[in-house]
Amino acid sequence: MAIATLDRCFNNPLVFSGVVKIRRGLAAKILLNSSTTEDVLGWFRHFTLSMKVKARRAKIQTSKLPATAGRTHAAVESLLKKLGDGPAVDGYIAPGFLLLFGSHLMRMPEWPDVTGLGLGLCAVMVAQMLVLVYHIVRTIQLHNDKADSNMWPTLARQITGHVSQPEGFALLGLYLCGTWLLRLMPDSYYSLEGAVQWLHVLAQLLIVDLLQYTMHRLEHVSANVWPALYQASHKLHHRFPTPNLTDAFHGSPVDTYLMILVPLFLTSIVSGFFNCNVWSYIWFGALYSSQLCLIHSNYDHPWGREFRKAGIATSADHHVHHKLYKYNYGHVFMYWDVIFGTYKQPDNIISFWSSKNKSEEAPLKETKVA
């Protein structure tokens, strides 16, 4: 129990803000599976390997306590030598080190608790359902001719296509499950303690938007520098000059990887430095996935003009990008476009629905932002 508690407390910032202890389920598991000396040694190997992972991460990531992290790493190495070779828990031998982006050098002694992962996936699914319900209601509201026989089949086709896109939910689901189970997420994500920190949510949104802005712009630059890459990735998404909400993830697996998965992973690494917890990560994921869909709407939202004043990306802003290509690369905010001189303001956009009930673009007025 002592070494399990030591592993739980090691390099855990929550020890300064609350009570940190092992779960009762884990305590019961240790008691029920410690009937022999080899079982006890297995548990010691298990938790010592876990501390070795954390010490190695701290040694790589922190600039404040490198000597302390190094001494801890040496201490656990010495303990592992004394324990000798053998399996960890339940005959499971930890795999070799996985080197991934330097700061994620690890050795995984067990599968992590998936409660946080399950909550995150559920939050994203609920957010997507709410977005789709909003899309249906808003479409009916703006579609004056409710007797149009094409409206409901079109909505059904759009929603079916949205939820079945392998480039979207399948890849995102694999990414979330894979990074969680392989312990590639920050240690603070694996604890359910604490509450949502809205500044951390905002920080993650700003970081991912900057990274996505960069990847988005580079993909467009590749159209001239490396045409094959652009054609295999982002060009497929730009087959929609006037996209609708359900076209958000219509593209290619390469596009999803470069523009969504890479920024998400790098954001998680950065958020680990300010100890972002799982609740903030869940809210970030739900808001981010919803925003990616909402900016692709072929109509303006009731909150559109107020969001635009605050610098939050709107469907009108993103519509400019799909028509003019070289402007408005941001997805969550327009701050980075303004800073780097790629913002074009859409004026006089109230709705993308014409009086004839056809999805048409409203006129765009290209105006320089002071």
Image: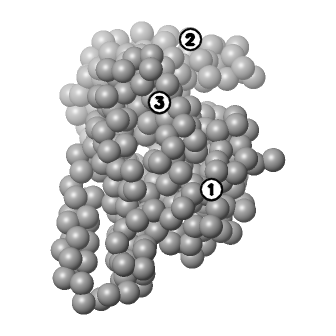
Mark seen at residue 365 = 1
> Relative to the observer, which residue lies in front, 334 or 192?
334
Q: Nearer the viewer, mark 2 or mark 3?
A: 3
Question: Is residue 200 in view from this perspective?
Answer: no
Q: Position of residue 15 (x, y in %)?
A: 66, 45
Q: Position of residue 325 (x, y in %)?
A: 49, 40
Q: Is residue 319 left or right of residue 250?
A: right
Q: Nearer the viewer, mark 1 or mark 2?
A: 1
Q: Position of residue 42 (x, y in %)?
A: 32, 27
Mark seen at residue 220 = 3
Question: What residue lies at 20% left-to-right and 66% top-to-bottom?
Answer: 157
Report the Cα–Cα distance between label 2 and label 3. Answer: 48 Å
> Relative to the observer, which residue lies in front, 312 or 30?
312
Report the Cα–Cα distance between label 1 and label 3. Answer: 22 Å
Reading the image, the residue beneath label 2 is 74
Q: Say if mark 2 contacts mark 3, CB within 8 Å.
A: no
Precedes in sequence: disc 2 or disc 3: 2
Question: What residue lies at 30% left-to-right and 39% top-to-bottom?
Answer: 236
Q: Which amino acid type is shown beneath numbered disc 1?
A: Lys
Report the residue that reaches farthest toward the right: 370
Does 242 appear above or below 166?
below
Q: Which image quarter: residue 231?
A: top left
